[in-house]
Image (tube, helix red, strand yellow):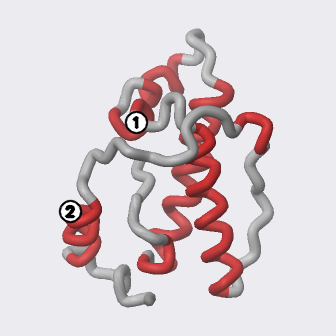
Amino acid sequence: MRVWDIHPKHLCRRHLLAEHRELHGLWNILTKHKSKDEGKRGYARRPETLRWVGKRKALYNRHEALVTEFARRGYQHHTPLDERFATGADSQSVFINTIREQKKILKEKPCECLLHK
């Protein structure tokens, strides 16, 4: 599970759509997690999940940035997040990889990421 921290305009179609899907999964873990749900509990302890704890507003903002990029590219979006759950910090300051490292990771992938400007 990965939510990138670079601007969505730099993501290829595949990574943009994959991040959106992953973000929804993460949102569900953060907003609907129950300790009895074994499947979600494992994801709740992963570093990508932990960095968003207390920052659902920031995650909501990232989703909106993805949706804006969808519209710019002419994609349809039909899965809004419930803004009532968008609480906590409104920006992300914890990174698993720095922005520079994320760009390097994307440059090494066989896709068109970082070509969209």
Across and down, in percent, residue 25 comes to 58, 43
Eyeballing the image, is 112 above or below 1? below
- Res. 101 mark: 2
Q: Which residue is mark 1?
A: 51
Q: Give the vertical position of 111 relative to 92 (above or below).
A: below
**Mark 1 falls on what kind of element?**
loop
Q: Position of residue 19 (x, y in %)?
A: 50, 59
- Name the residue type under label 1: Arg
Left or right: where does residue 24 sit relative to residue 1?
right
Q: Which mark is residue 88?
A: none
Q: What's the residue at 45%, 71% (across, down)?
A: 7
Q: Are marks 1 and 2 in contact (CB under 8 Å)?
A: no
The answer to whether residue 50 is above or below residue 86 is above
Q: Secondary structure at mark 2?
A: helix
Mark 2: few/some/many CA within 10 Å (<14, 14-19, 20+)? few
Tell me the CA gap for discs 1 and 2: 17 Å
Few, some or many C-alpha atoms within 10 Å of disc 1 (few <14, some 14-19, many ≥20)? some
Amino acid under disc 2: Glu
Q: Hey, which residue is sitting farthest top in the picture?
A: 36
Residue 30 falls in which quadrant of the image?
Answer: top right
Residue 24 lies, with reference to residue 99, above or below; the image says: above
Horizontal and vertical percent position of residue 57: 62, 42
The C terminus - image quarter: bottom left
Q: Residue at x 27, y 80 (%)?
A: 110
* Residue 34 percent across, percent down from the top left: 62, 16
Which residue corresponds to the image point at 46% horizontal and 26% vertical from the top-left?
44
